[in-house]
Image: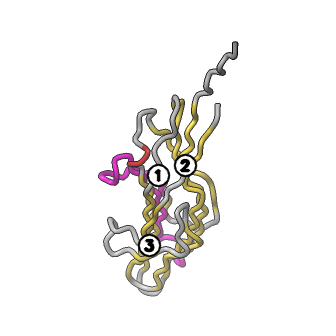
Amino acid sequence: MPIITLNPTSNTTPDPGQVGSLAVTGNTNTGHASTTALKNGAGEQTKSCLWTGFPAAPPGQILGATLKVDWQQNGSLTDGGTSTSNLFEIDYSINGGSTFPLLRQDTLIQSLSSGTSSVSLSLTQDLTQVRVRDTLDAIGVAGESASVTVTISNIRIEVQIADREPIALM
């Protein structure tokens, strides 16, 4: 059973749906380079990106479809998170951006980690309606600082297609 990989064909940074956020670094149609949200002293800094334009499902009987996003994160909180905070979040939409359920959320990040977040999509999902967005947020207080650094890569939908029956030659 073959697996077809579909990638988004467009990205926007900052995500226009996240008012007040700033652009990420090195955005591409499948992720972004290492990007840091940093706040020294009181206040907040937010950065975001939105990925859209997944192609339609390939022809054939779909046996499964999974949205996957690879990520790496690291962070620093000078007071250990007593008054400062940071956040890394990945959301996805299956309805063209009307709603964005949570795919991954980490807070009070103070060490390096990486992985792949994934969610199964319905067999009848219109893949052109899928969206992915990420948010990096650092909240500082007077005399302290907060940061979060994130890399996103390999945003994709893996579609498993049933094998076609061989054609018998007579």
- Viewer-side label of 3, 2: 2
* The furthest residue to the front: 170
Is 135 displayed left or right of 35 in the figure?
Answer: left
Q: Disc 1 versus disc 2: distance between alpha carbons?
A: 7 Å
In-front residue for pair 162/154: 162
- Please name the amino acid that badge 3 sits on: Lys
Residue matched to label 3? 47
- Please name the amino acid that badge 2 sits on: Leu
In-front residue for pair 66/108: 66
Residue 40 position, x and y percent, is 47, 85
Quarter of the image where the N terminus is located: top right
Secondary structure state at the residue bearing disc 3: strand
In-front residue for pair 118/53: 53
Residue 64, relative to residue 93: is it above or below? above
Residue 78 position, x and y percent, is 54, 78
Point 43% across, 71% down: residue: 13
Residue 6's tag is 2
Q: Is residue 62 magenta?
A: no
Earlier in the chain: of badge 1 and badge 3, it is 3
Q: Could one spot residue 42 in this view of the protein?
A: yes
